[in-house]
Structure formats: C-alpha cells, structure tokens
Image (spheres, grey):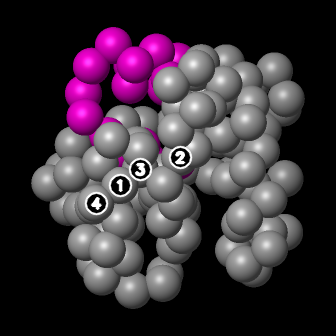
Amino acid sequence: MEKLNILLSCSYGFSTSSLVKKMETYCQEKGYPFTVNALAETNALESIDDYNVVLIGPQVRYLKPKFDNAIKGKIPVYVMDTRSYGRLQVGEIVEQMLDDMREEGYYE
C-alpha cells in the first residue's frame, strides 16, 4: 500500500485535534502508511504540494470549490461525511476516502 499524506482542513477546535489523533491511530492499526495533518485554509493552500488528498470538514464545505480551483485535479478533495465527522468515526472517513480515491483513479 502506498504512503499517503492526508490533509484535513476544517475549523480548529477539539474535534479536529481528536480527529487527527484518531485517524492516525486507525491507520496504524490497519497498517496503512498514512500521515494525517490539520491546517487552516490559508496554510493548507500554501502547502498543498506536500499532500496526496484533502479532506474538508463538513462545516467548511463551502471551501471545496476554492481547493478544487487551486489544486486543478492534481489530488482529490473530499468533504467528510457530516455524521462520520461529528461522531469521530474515523474508520468510515478513511475507508470512504480510499474507496473514492480508487474509484476516481487516484489510488490503487
């Protein structure tokens, strides 16, 4: 399985830091060689070349077109499912991301 650098872009707060930690733990447990980082929108757009996929928090879904425009299809940008995000169901978030990436040809 190839290494992925995952960028979370959402409003900072308890849920974001918890989500990053839980996602890292989930990926380690599943043997996925993924790293997870969270950045605010401005910092995220400035360092986008360091990542393979962007996951946007549902509360800032309005940022998706801005990311899409900046990235121009080089990497996928997904809005995390509201329910999975709110419940910190990281397994669902990671597996949905992988399914979408495979379906769109970004990941084998």
Residue 27 horizontal side relative to residue 76, left or right = right
Residue 3 % position (x, y): 69, 51
Q: Are marks 1 and 4 in contact (CB under 8 Å)?
A: yes
Q: Are marks 3 and 4 in contact (CB under 8 Å)?
A: no
Q: Earlier in the sequence, mark 2 or mark 4?
A: 4
Residue 47, can we see it? Answer: no
**Quadrant where the C terminus is found in the figure:** bottom right
Q: Earlier in the sequence, mark 2 or mark 1?
A: 1
Q: Label 2 amino acid?
A: Met
Q: Are marks 3 and 2 in contact (CB under 8 Å)?
A: yes
Residue at 66% x, 40% y: name it: 93
- Which residue does the numbered mark 4 point to in the structure image? 62
Q: Between tags 3 and 4, which lies in front?
A: 4
Residue at 33% x, 13% y: name it: 14
- Which residue does the numbered mark 3 point to in the structure image? 56
Q: CA distance from mark 1 to mark 4?
A: 4 Å
Q: Label 3 amino acid?
A: Ile
* Mark 3 residue element: strand
**Magenta part of the chain:** 6-21
- Which residue does the numbered mark 2 point to in the structure image? 80
- Find residue 70 and report its image quarter: bottom left
Residue 78 % position (x, y): 52, 60
Instruction: Using the image, determine if residue 20 lies above or below residue 59.
Output: above
Q: Residues within 10 Å of mark 1 (few under 14, many from 20)?
A: some
Q: Earlier in the sequence, mark 3 or mark 2?
A: 3
Q: Residues within 10 Å of mark 3 (few under 14, many from 20)?
A: many
Q: Nearer the viewer, residue 91 or 27?
A: 91
Q: Label 4 amino acid?
A: Tyr
Q: Earlier in the sequence, mark 3 or mark 4?
A: 3
Q: CA distance from mark 3 to mark 4?
A: 9 Å
Residue 61 tag number: 1
